[in-house]
Image (cartoon, grey):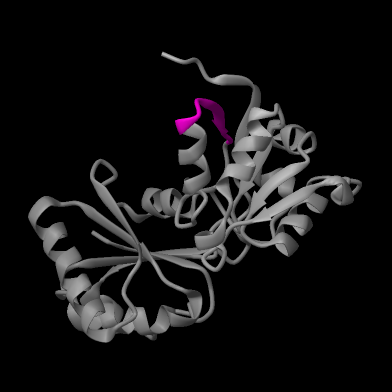
Amino acid sequence: MQMPNTKSVLYLIPTPLGENNIEEILPRGNLLIINQLRYFVVEQIRTARRFLRKTNPSFPIDDCQFFELNEHTQAQFKTHEIIDLLQQGHSVGLLSEAGLPCIADPGNIVVAAAQDKQIKIQPLVGPSSLMLALMASGFCGQKFIFHGYLPTNKNELTAKIKQMEANLLKNGTTQIFIETPYRNIQLFDSLLKNCQSETKLCIACHLTLKDEWIVCKRIAQWKQTSPPDINKKPAVFLIG
C-alpha cells in the first residue's frame, strides 16, 4: 500500500459560529498552524480574510492564495490545482464559513481527492453546531441522522417531515436538520403542522454566542407558546 505524502498536509480548519473571541473558541495549536499556511480553500474570500485577521492582526493576507469553493463555484472548481499544490509540498487550509469544514458544505470534494492521492489530512478541533445541539437536546446520542437542508417545496417538505418522524418513532433515531435562516419560521410552522403532538422538537439558536438559547418542548407545548425568535438567525432543529 502506498504511504501518505508526508511533505504536505491538507488541514481542515474550523471557524467560529459567530462573532466570538477567537481564543475562546479555537485551541492555540490551531492558530499556530493557520499562521504558517499561505494557501486556502474557502467558501467566501472576504469572510476568510476577516477570519485570518482575527487569528493574527499582522497575518500576511497579501501573500496568500485563495480558492473559492461554494455552491456557485463547485461545478467549475479545479480540484486538481489543490492536489498539485499539495503534491508539490505546500500545505493547504480548508475552512468553512462557520463551524466544521465538509459538514453541510462542499469541501468534501477536496478531501476526497486528497484521500485518493494518499495525501495527509488533518482535521482540527473546533465547534460543531450539530453536535452541540445534540448534546444539549437530551435526545438519543447513540443513533442520529443529519439531513442537512430540507426541501423548500411545500409538499416535499411535508413528506420529508413525516418521513423523519416515522423513522424516529420506529427506531428512536434522533433527526437533525437545518434551514437557511430566513426560512426558519416557515420550517417551524411546518413542523408544528405535520408532527404529532407528543413528538419533541428542540431548537438550538446562536450556539456559542452570548445570546445562545436551546429549548426542547413537545409539539403540543410549542403550539401553546409564542413563536421562537429564530427569524434570520442560525439555528439547528432536532426531533426526538
* Residue 227, x across and y down, in percent: 39, 84
User: What residue is shown at x 37% (from left), y 84% (from top)?
Assistant: 186
Q: Does any portion of residue 40 appear in the rendered image?
A: yes
Q: Is residue 117 magenta?
A: yes
User: What residue is shown at x 76% (from left), y 37% (from top)?
Assistant: 37
Residue 232 versus residue 33 in the image, above or below: below
* Residue 32, x across and y down, in percent: 76, 32
Q: Which residues are magenta?
A: 116-124
Quadrant where the N terminus sits is top left
Pick the front one: 38 or 89:
89
Q: Is residue 130 magenta?
A: no
Quarter where residue 174 is shown: bottom left
User: What residue is shown at x 39% (from left), y 86% (from top)?
Assistant: 226
Quadrant where the C terminus sits is bottom left
Pick the front one: 18 or 48:
48
- Whether residue 188 sits left or right of residue 156 in the image: it is right
